[in-house]
Amino acid sequence: MPLARSTSFQGVVRSLWLVVRSQWFVVRSCSLAVVVWALTLLSGVSAQSEMYEGFSAGGLHYVAEGHGPVVVLIHAFHMDLREWDDVAPELTGSRRIVRYDVRGHGSSRVAGPLPSPSADLSTLLDELRIDGATLVGSSMGATIALELALTAPTRVERLILVAPGVPGVEQGASPAWLSPIMSVVRAGDPSRAAELWWDSPLFEALRARPDAAARIRRVVADNARIWGLSRAPGLTPPAGSRLEEVAVPVTVIAGDRDQFGSQDVGRIVAGRVRAGEMVVLEGAGHMIALERPRQLSEIILRSMSPR
């Protein structure tokens, strides 16, 4: 498993050793209890801070951090794993968090036609030796999570679908703001398409936040290449026609200001799976992981808690 970066217990121990070596005369006078306390503290730091970043054998860029039951975070279209930057730290204290760039996004490599996103994720889980996990998907990521639950049900322990749009579930007519984006895509200008995507109602709440707007706009711009790639294959028949097959607990989350139809889709999904619940966030739009990271993290942890 190739790793680009490792921030872990070893780095903390190295720093401690430098202090011990330079202050040995003080350390000699420490009691055994103090030494035990220090090691206990360091083991806690290790559990909180250990992080691995790298690429799978197939070229998927991922970050894994924390310890405990596994949670896989799957980002929205035109985003990458940075969508979860404010969510992951809220979860790593008690969970192992894996987030990755869906192929065609972020730093994940593209060597040909895009494969099935759910099959791609399944291969990544194989490589990371993850047998089962809670899947949290945002928008497009919700579809990937749902498709994996249908094609590899033993790998999925729970689904948390955030602002979902599900193939096979009626979402209404395409919004008018998509038309100019598709026009510039057909004209071969992915950078302009990315600018228009950022200017769309999807990011309305975030554009009004000076603390976050520049950072998120950069993520959108960095993923302009997705407009030049062929569309990845989905399930046939589509996931929306097979919802009754989903046996794991499903929590669907949507904002009451979402302009992409996610509330309607979410209610249908929650009503047709075997064990579904619907959560509506007042005042939230479509990009909930960016708009409400703490609230979303609390819902994720609550959904995973024994009842």
Image: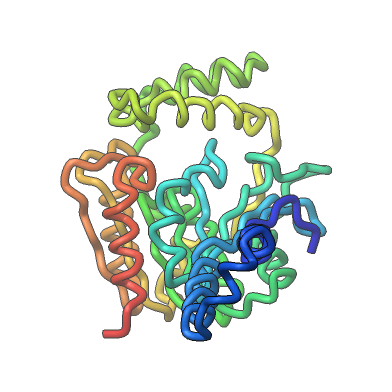
Q: Tell me if 258 is positioned left or right of 130 in this view.
A: left
Quadrant location, the C terminus? bottom left
x, y (%) of residue 33? Answer: 47, 84
Identify which residue is drawn at 47% across, 49% down.
84
x, y (%) of residue 174? Answer: 39, 33
Q: Is residue 236 above or below residue 250?
A: above
> Closest to the observer: 203 or 11?
11
Colour scheme used in the picture? Answer: rainbow
Q: Is residue 9 above or below residue 248?
A: above
x, y (%) of residue 50? Answer: 59, 63
Q: Quadrant of residue 120?
A: bottom right
Q: Tell me if 243 is positioned left or right of 184 in this view.
A: left
Q: Is residue 44 above or below residue 279?
A: below
Quadrant location, the N terminus? bottom right
Q: Kindly tell me whether residue 118 is visible in this rendering.
A: no
Identify which residue is drawn at 60% across, 21% down.
185
Q: How many marks?
A: 0
Furthest-left residue in view?
282
Identify which residue is drawn at 50% across, 53% down.
141
x, y (%) of residue 235? Answer: 59, 60
Q: Tell me if 260 is positioned left or right of 81 in this view.
A: left
Identify which residue is drawn at 39% across, 52% down.
164
Q: Quadrant of residue 260?
A: top left
> Closest to the observer: 271 or 215?
215
Q: Kindly tell me whether residue 190 is visible in this rendering.
A: yes
